[in-house]
Each structure stands twice: as structure tokens, then as C-alpha cells.
Amino acid sequence: MSSGVLVITLVAALGSGLAAGFFLAFSTGVMPALGRLPAAQAAAAMQTINVVVINPLFMTVLFGTALACLASIVGALADWDAAYGPYLLAGGAVYLLGTIGVTMVANVPRNDALARLDPASAEAESHWERYLAEWTAWNHVRTGASLIALGLEIGALYGS
């Protein structure tokens, strides 16, 4: 493994681990806690979280890792005969599809729909329970995908 691919793989692995930990905290702590609040309070809190989370540090972890995964896929394809190639390709693909793809297709649209609601409205109250269940289920997928990507990226490091 060249030093460039090694650095990219380390960045992808660290980012995948950070993303997995962040999503795990939501699945195991934040969302269950919000689920214990009255719907209006929970919806208002989640609306605030969804604004605050769009910050340079989190966006760098989430999308910087995606860039590292793209670069690792290129590295894998460039040196496909190396033992680490399939691990890098699979790890990058799992992160891009299971973490970024799910975020953009499942979680963000739900966040956008929640943002349009007045938390104190009857519509928000009826929407909240469905949002909580669906958003959390998709967040479990993102957590698992990030963990699997991390494992594959570590596998690439051991295979180099």
C-alpha cells in the first residue's frame, strides 16, 4: 500500500468510526430520550438539533469521510491486485451507500418535513411518532453501515 493510500485509508477509517459513534449516540440515547418527551417538545428539540448539527466539524466528518472513501475506491481500483483492494472498494461503497446515501434519501427528507411543522400543532403531534420510528430505523442503518465500513477499512490496513 502506498503512503498516499495508507493515509486515505486511515482517514476513511477514522471518519467512519467517528460517524458510527455519532449515529450510535443518536440511536441509543438521543432518540429514546426524545421519545419520552411530549410530541411538541420532542419535535421542537429535534428541529433545533437538525439546525445545530449542520456545522463545520460534523459536516467535515460526514462528507470528508465520503471524499476519503471515494479516494480509497480509486486507490483500490488502481492497485486491484493488492490484497487490500477488495476491502477498500467494499468499505468505500458501504460508507457511500449506507451512510451518505441513507442520510440523503431517508434522514434528510424526514428532517426537512419536520422542519416545516409548527411543533405545537396537531399535525406535528401526529407526525412525530412516525418520524421518531422511521428516522431512528434509518439511523440504525447508518450506524451499521459506518461500522461495517470501518471494519473493512481496518481489513484493508491489515491486508496491505
Image (tube, rainbow, N blue to C red):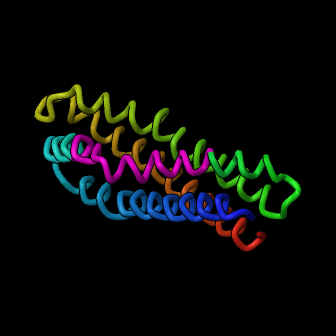
Residue 34 x %, y %? 24, 54
73 sits left or right of 115 in the view: right
> Which residue range is magenta in the image?
49-70
- Residue 76 in the figure: left or right of residue 129: right
Judged from this view, the residue extending furthest toward the right is 81
On the picture, is 47 further left or further right than 68? left
The residue depicted at 37 percent of the width and 46 percent of the height is 59
> Which residue is at the far left?
120
Which residue is at 49% across, 59% downward?
15
Q: Is residue 51 above or below residue 84?
A: above
Q: Position of residue 117 (x, y in %)?
A: 20, 28
Residue depicted at 18% across the width and 53% down the height? 37
Image location of residue 69, percent across then percent down: 60, 50
Toward the viewer: 45 or 94? 94
Along the line of sight, the residue nearer the viewer: 149 or 30:
149
Residue 45 counted in the magenta span: no
Provide residue 10's location: percent of width, then percent of height: 58, 65
Q: Quadrant of residue 112?
A: top left
Which SS type dominates the magenta stretch? helix
Quadrant containing the C terminus is: bottom right
Q: Residue furthest front?
A: 3
39 to 10, vertically: above or below: above
